[in-house]
């Protein structure tokens, strides 16, 4: 869950966190959370540092926070890599220049996993010693009694042919190109026409409006694949817990929060074989990895068959 926060959280010292969105958690007693959309330029950030007597600036995402860093920042700066910065933004020369300046200014750089740290070293070998790996974590999830995913889908998508034997695959993601939510849609739709008990639900907020429009248009011709708006956090956790499996089809990832949540809820995971996902999912140990659309269908069918194979299914979930 995220929210945008524009003000000091109650005190005037210690840490300024500069990020695109700020995680909702127990607020630190000595932090100032700043959304980058509310900071006009580096001079305004410098003013905030002085106004709140900030001792440390923590920037999330090398490009988004890097755009606002004054070169003469008077306090230490720690950079937390986001994922799209080292996987996507680095491909644009001007963005790479901004990120390189941020890396040069940083006292330390935090990567969520070993693959992200390796990517950092590839991009900035001269700063390799700055990078440390600190995996993400999530708060313990307590799922309140709520409606199952089948009940929710019956309300939101009454045209879907759902029964008690239906297998709901959930792809939880914001709608933006790097998440590639249409990667599996045609193959899954063809599979659905052969096995109507299987449906794919894409659920998440619109991040890129043009891409979201393209997704909606494409799904008109993909029976068995539906798009839902985001659900409130506790409701989503209940939805996910009652689903058959979580799917991740991203082109690149830093460290997927949805996969972490699924693993905590002991929901089977099918993830695209990319570096960030491989930091979390070990094939046939705590999940299944796929490389192509056809490979996904094969692994999904294997997971369905595995439900009848008690040893396979138990071993898959026990490793979570």
Image (spheres, rainbow, N blue to C red):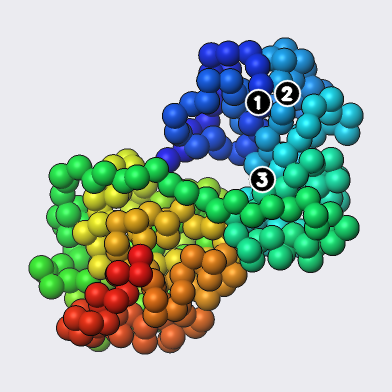
Q: Front-most of 24 and 5?
A: 24
Residue at 43% x, 86% y is 294
Q: How many marks?
A: 3
Q: Which badge, 1 or 3, is on the more N-terminal residue?
A: 1
- Residue 217 at x, y = what percent? 44, 63
- Residue 293 at x, y = what percent? 45, 82
Check whether the beta carbons of the residues at disc 1 and disc 2 lie within 8 A of each other. Answer: yes
Q: Which badge, 2 or 3, is on the more N-terminal residue?
A: 2
- Residue 273 at x, y = what percent? 52, 76
**Label 2 to label 3: alpha-carbon separation:** 17 Å
Q: Front-most of 116 and 197?
A: 116
The image shows residue 99, relative to residue 312, as above or below, that is above
- Relative side of 244 to 73, left or right: left
Residue at 41% x, 51% y is 204
For discs 2 and 3, the disc positioned in front in the rendered view: 2
- Quick one: SS at disc 2? strand
Report the residue marked by disc 1: 15
Label 1, residues with CA under 10 Å away: few <14, some 14-19, many ≥20: many
Using the image, tell me which numbered label, if any, was put on residue 80. Answer: 3
- Where does the N terminus fall, quadrant-wise? top left
Using the image, tell me which numbered label, if any, was put on residue 55. Answer: 2
- Relative side of 54 to 159, left or right: right
């Amino acid at each position: 869950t995220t929210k945008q926060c524009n003000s000091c959280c109650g005190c005037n010292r210690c840490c300024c966190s500069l990020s695109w969105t700020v995680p909702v958690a127990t607020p630190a007693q000595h932090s100032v959370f700043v959304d980058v959309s509310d900071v006009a330029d580096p001079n305004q950030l410098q003013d905030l540092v002085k106004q709140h007597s900030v001792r440390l600036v923590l920037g999330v995402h090398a490009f988004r926070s890097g755009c606002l860093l004054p070169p003469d920042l008077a306090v230490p700066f720690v950079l937390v890599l986001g994922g799209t910065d080292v996987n996507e933004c680095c491909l644009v020369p001007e963005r790479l220049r901004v990120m390189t300046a941020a890396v040069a200014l940083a006292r330390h750089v935090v990567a969520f996993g070993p693959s992200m740290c390796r990517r950092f070293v590839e991009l900035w070998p001269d700063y390799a010693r700055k990078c440390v790996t600190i995996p993400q974590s999530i708060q313990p999830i307590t799922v309140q009694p709520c409606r199952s995913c089948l009940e929710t889908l019956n309300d939101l998508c009454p045209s879907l042919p759902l029964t008690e034997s239906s297998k709901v695959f959930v792809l939880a993601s914001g709608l933006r190109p790097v998440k590639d939510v249409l990667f599996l849609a045609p193959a899954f739709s063809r599979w659905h026409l052969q096995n109507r008990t299987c449906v794919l639900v894409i659920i998440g907020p619109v991040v890129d409006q043009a891409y979201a429009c393209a997704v909606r248009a494409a799904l008109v011709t993909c029976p068995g694949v539906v798009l839902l708006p985001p659900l409130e956090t506790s409701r989503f956790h209940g939805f996910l817990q009652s689903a058959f499996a979580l799917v991740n089809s991203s082109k690149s990832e830093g460290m997927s929060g949805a996969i972490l949540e699924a693993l905590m809820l002991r929901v089977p995971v099918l993830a695209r074989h990319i570096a960030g996902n491989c930091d979390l999912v070990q094939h046939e140990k705590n999940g299944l990895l796929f490389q192509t659309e056809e490979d996904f269908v094969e692994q999904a069918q294997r997971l369905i068959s595995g439900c009848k194979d008690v040893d396979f299914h138990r071993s898959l979930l026990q490793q979570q």
